[in-house]
């Protein structure tokens, strides 16, 4: 399987990176580690339950570090739910899963006012969005009205019920999934909402050796519903994430690298294969993910290789192919590769 993120200097995305957390926070197994070491331990922990998805785990961690959200695209059965639950467990965060359907209402996600007969008052009952890691399963199967309610939670980190804003817990990440094969009865996400996701990650089937390892684990008694039995321990927490974010804010971006990011975005707008290129928001997102990647690699400055490593996952959902390009077999990743090859790299 091709890694989602190419290796950057000092960081191998195929090495263990992130630990696991259960629905309720528990004391850290290794409380004295610095933020970077803790996050490097997270992938080790998640790997105890999930095999062959190291690059996706790295992408999820980058989203948490950048206070962004992630769109996971993959067929059913490739451990998307297990990924999010394991990551939450390793980070000592709460996680919730919502199955999005055609009859799901906004209040089913955000919460609603319930009449209390004892007090004769309406009480707010929190919905599943009041969590740290929300898995929005098959988000494109729910109507636009419910999608819009989720969008407010993603962008504003709050929900409004009867005109009253209610802040969400921190950290807060939405991991939304969609099936790339089945589109019957779906409501495709509009471009404005796609642009709100920091990255789009492809969750592919594992390689043959990795799939054998999955079956071997199950034959040995592995139970996906029992993460504690899999040996996953919390090795980082919300305070560690906050410290990591503060460190990332100190990562420097040279003017030449900033110009490189802008040139890449502008090149997508001029590509003959695209009818929609990367917006300034997309360029800002690429800079943010590149800084997080550089920090994970142990540097306090961004290099062009960091930008290249994050270009595809950060930009692939922000571009639209022309119909004629699609008929010729072009893909968003292929066009981005062409752009990366054509824009001069600063020295």
Image (cartoon, grey):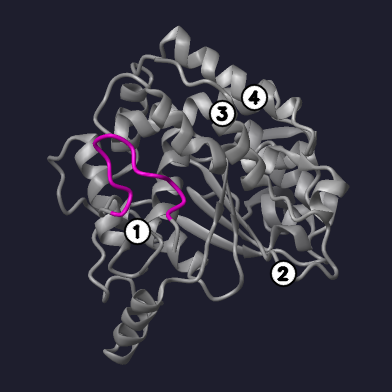
Q: Which residue is mark 4?
A: 265
Question: Magenta segment: does it hold 7?
Answer: yes
Could you tell me if residue 119 is visible in this image?
no
Q: Residue at x 21, y 50 (%)?
A: 28
SS label for mark 4 = helix
N-term-proximal mark, 2 vs 3: 2
> Where is residue 182, by image quadrant?
bottom right
Marks 4/2: CA–CA distance: 29 Å
Quadrant the N terminus occupies: bottom left
Q: Secondary structure at mark 1?
A: helix
Residue 216: within the magenta?
no
Q: Residue furthest bottom?
A: 219
- Contact (Cβ within 8 Å) of mark 4 with mark 2: no
Numbered circle sitting on residue 89: 1
Q: Earlier in the sequence, mark 4 or mark 1?
A: 1
For label 3, count other residues whose C-alpha is less than 10 Å away and answer few (under 14), some (14-19) or many (20+).
many
Which residues lie in the magenta part? 3-14
Q: Which residue is mark 3?
A: 285
Find disc 2 in the rendering and name its residue.
181
Instruction: State the predominant SS element of the stretch in magenta.
Output: loop
- CA separation in Å, label 1 and label 3: 27 Å
Question: Of discs 1 and 3, which sits in the foreground?
Answer: 3
Q: Give the crowd class for mark 2: few <14, some 14-19, many >=20 residues within 10 Å.
A: few
Can you say whether 263 is above or below 129 in the image? above
Depth check, mark 4 against mark 2: the one in front is: 4
Q: Secondary structure at mark 3?
A: helix
Whether residue 231 is situated above or below residue 18 in the rendered picture: below
> Contact (CB < 8 A) between labels 4 and 1?
no
- Residue at 28%, 34% in the rendered image: 9
């Amino acid at each position: 399987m091709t890694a989602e993120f190419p290796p950057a200097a000092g960081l191998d995305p195929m090495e263990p990176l992130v630990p696991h957390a259960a629905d309720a926070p528990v004391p850290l197994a290794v409380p004295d580690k610095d933020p970077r070491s803790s996050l490097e331990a997270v992938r080790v922990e998640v790997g105890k339950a999930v095999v062959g998805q190291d690059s996706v785990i790295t992408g999820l961690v980058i989203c948490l570090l950048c206070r962004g959200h992630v769109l996971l695209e993959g067929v059913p059965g490739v451990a998307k739910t297990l990924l999010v639950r394991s990551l939450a467990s390793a980070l000592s965060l709460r996680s919730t899963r919502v199955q999005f359907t055609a009859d799901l209402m906004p209040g089913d996600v955000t919460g609603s006012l319930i009449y209390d007969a004892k007090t004769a008052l309406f009480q707010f009952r929190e919905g599943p969005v009041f969590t740290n890691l929300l898995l929005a399963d098959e988000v494109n199967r729910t109507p636009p009205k419910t999608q819009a309610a989720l969008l407010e939670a993603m962008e504003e980190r709050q929900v409004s019920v009867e005109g009253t804003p209610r802040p969400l817990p921190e950290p807060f990440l939405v991991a939304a999934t969609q099936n790339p094969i089945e589109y019957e009865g779906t409501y495709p996400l509009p471009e404005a909402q796609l642009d709100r996701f920091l990255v789009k990650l492809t969750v592919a089937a594992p390689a043959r050796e990795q799939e054998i390892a999955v079956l071997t684990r199950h034959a040995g008694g592995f139970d996906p519903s029992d993460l504690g039995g899999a040996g996953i321990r919390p090795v980082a927490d919300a305070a560690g994430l906050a410290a990591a974010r503060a460190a990332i804010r100190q990562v420097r971006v040279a003017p030449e690298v900033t110009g490189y990011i802008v040139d890449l975005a502008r090149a997508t707008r001029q590509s003959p294969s695209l009818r929609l290129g990367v917006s300034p928001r997309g360029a800002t997102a690429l800079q943010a993910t590149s800084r997080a990647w550089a920090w994970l690699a142990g540097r306090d400055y961004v290099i062009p290789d960091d930008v290249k490593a994050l270009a595809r996952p950060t930009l692939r959902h922000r571009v639209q192919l022309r119909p004629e390009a699609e008929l010729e077999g072009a893909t968003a990743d292929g066009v981005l590769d062409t752009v990366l090859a054509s824009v001069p790299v600063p020295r």
